[in-house]
Image (cartoon, helix red, strand yellow):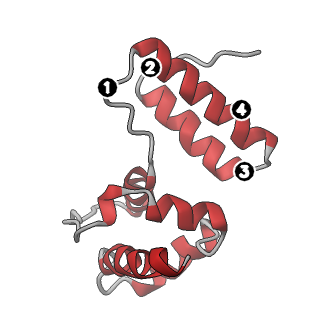
Amino acid sequence: MEGNQSILLDKLFNFFDMFGDKKHLMIKYMLDNNIFSDSFIESILSNSNFNDSVDVPNFNRIEDIFPFYNTLLDDFDNSGDTPEDILYNLNNKLDEYILKDMFEEAIRLRDYMKKNNIDRIIK
């Protein structure tokens, strides 16, 4: 973890920087997403969205804020995979989240699949 710690610090700095002066929203987002869990830390470490600072749009509605940050955390990069591979991999990941009681992650993945018209395969 020692080598990853400096990478994590850099990425978390970029992530926190996106909230700007909206610290109360950052704290709520951190609490809602259990930011210090191993799965959240892993999603930050493996996510290329936080290598540099990200331009955050101005939101007209508060309901649009957290979905924006959630899309940045989505690590469902499937470039180069066949459609069958994507279907299989995302369904397996969703099953894994459900089995591990990682319901917030399961909901995010389910929403991602719906948004991208990826079918759910029930086993």
List the residue tagged with mark 1: 80
Residue 65 in percent (x, y) is at 38, 62
Residue lying at 55% horizontally and 16% vertically, measured from the top left: 119
| Numbered label attached to residue 91 | none
Q: Which residue is mark 2?
A: 117
**Alpha carbon separation for disc pair 2 and 3:** 22 Å
Element at label 3: loop
Q: Give the mark, 2 or 3, whose residue is nearer the N terminus.
A: 3
Which numbered disc, 3 or 4, marks the residue that appears first in the sequence?
4
Which residue, given by chain and number where applicable, does mark 3 sit on? Answer: 102
Q: Amino acid at mark 3?
A: Met
Which residue type carries mark 1? Gly
Q: Secondary structure at mark 1?
A: loop
Residue in the picture at 72% in, 50% down: 102
Badge nearest the viewer, 2 or 3: 3
Give the CA distance from mark 3 to mark 4. 10 Å
- The crowding category of the residue bearing disc 4, from other C-alpha atoms within 10 Å (few below 14, some 14 to 19, many at least 20), is some
Extreme-front residue of the structure: 3
Residue contact at pointers 2 and 3, CB within 8 angstroms:
no
Q: Nearer the viewer, mark 1 or mark 3?
A: 1
Q: Is residue 43 left or right of residue 105?
A: left
Q: Are marks 1 and 4 in contact (CB under 8 Å)?
A: no
Q: Check the image and report above or below for 121 versus 10.
A: above
**Looking at the rendering, in which quadrant would you find the C terminus?**
top right
Indicate which label's residue lies in the foreground, 4 or 2: 4
CA separation in Å, label 4 and label 2: 18 Å
Q: Which numbered disc, 4 or 2, marks the residue that appears first in the sequence?
A: 4
Task: Residue under label 4, please give it.
Answer: 95
